Image: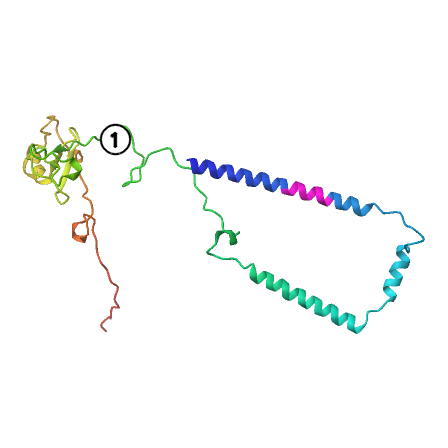
Amino acid sequence: MKEYHRQCRLQQEEVSQVKKTVKEDKVKAFIEKERSITSKPLNPFSEAPPTKRAKLDHSETPSTSTSSSSGTAAAAAAVSENGDKKSELPSFWIPSLTPQAKATLIEKPSKAVYCPMSKKPLRIKNLIQVNFVRADDVNDKRPLVAKQIRYKCAVTHDILSNKTPCAVLRPSGKVVTMDCIKKIIKKDMTDPFTGDTLKENDIIKIRRGGTGFASAAESSLEAKKARPVMMAS
């Protein structure tokens, strides 16, 4: 949100700068026009009248050497201009030499919190507190992060690992293994901790984290290769 507000402030500054530049250009054009209207007093002893000066300029014809020298100068100016253009070619690797490149506009962030999986807005009443049962060992004094065995099933006390399929019971929020659900809980469909009757959507399966093996992922992974098919006549 801070980046979005900063972007809006920069856009406003750019708009105000453009308006200021347009106003300054109008003032400069007005001043130049006013200067062209006013004329200086003519000194008859030192300067010729404008009409006579124009006739004198028209009567003079430039020589061949003058025209050739002017053509050479024009060609040299064109070459130098092209050289300057070549030296000022844009670079795609240096941001200062790419004035046409603009920063990506940031959309206004939404105030709603979205689920990273379903991309739907989250509500407090839809959230469930997950209660893991810790597999505490009296002799192990290490912190929880350093332990390989951390949690266990709330019913069977089986050790939970990354490869253990688990589920959460909605009424109590306890984490149990899928084997426990199939062999114990689904027989009477009752939460053993609260006594509430369970429905199918009250058993929420926990998605396991991915590993380096494709077979460990729960999502369906398929490798497909298109090959030409020959039809029999």
Q: What's the coloring here?
A: rainbow
Quarter occupied by residue 140: top left
**Callout 1 environment at 10 Å: few (<14), some (14 to 19), or many (20+)?**
few
Residue 25 in view (yes/no):
yes
Viewer-proximal residue, 49 or 181?
A: 49
Residue at 27%, 29% (x, y): give it.
124
SS category of the residue bearing label 1: helix
Boundaries of the magenta span: 21-29
Membership of 28 in magenta stretch: yes
Quarter occupied by residue 202: top left
Residue at 16%, 36% (x, y): give it.
144
Disc 1 target residue = 126
**Which amino acid lies under the numbered mark 1 shown in the image of this protein?**
Asn
Residue 4 horizontal/vertical position (percent): 44, 38
Quadrant location of the C terminus in the rendered image: bottom left
Residue at 77%, 70% (x, y): give it.
67
The kind of secondary structure the magenta stretch mainly shows is helix
Does residue 172 appear to the left or right of 184 in the view shown?
A: right
Quarter occupied by residue 187: top left
Does residue 180 appear to the left or right of 90 in the view shown?
A: left
Residue 204 in view (yes/no):
no
Viewer-proximal residue, 51 or 183?
A: 51
Residue 110 horizontal/vertical position (percent): 39, 35
Quadrant location of the N terminus in the rendered image: top left
Check the image and report above or below for 22 versus 123.
Answer: below
Residue at 6%, 34% (x, y): give it.
139
Q: Residue furthest right?
A: 45
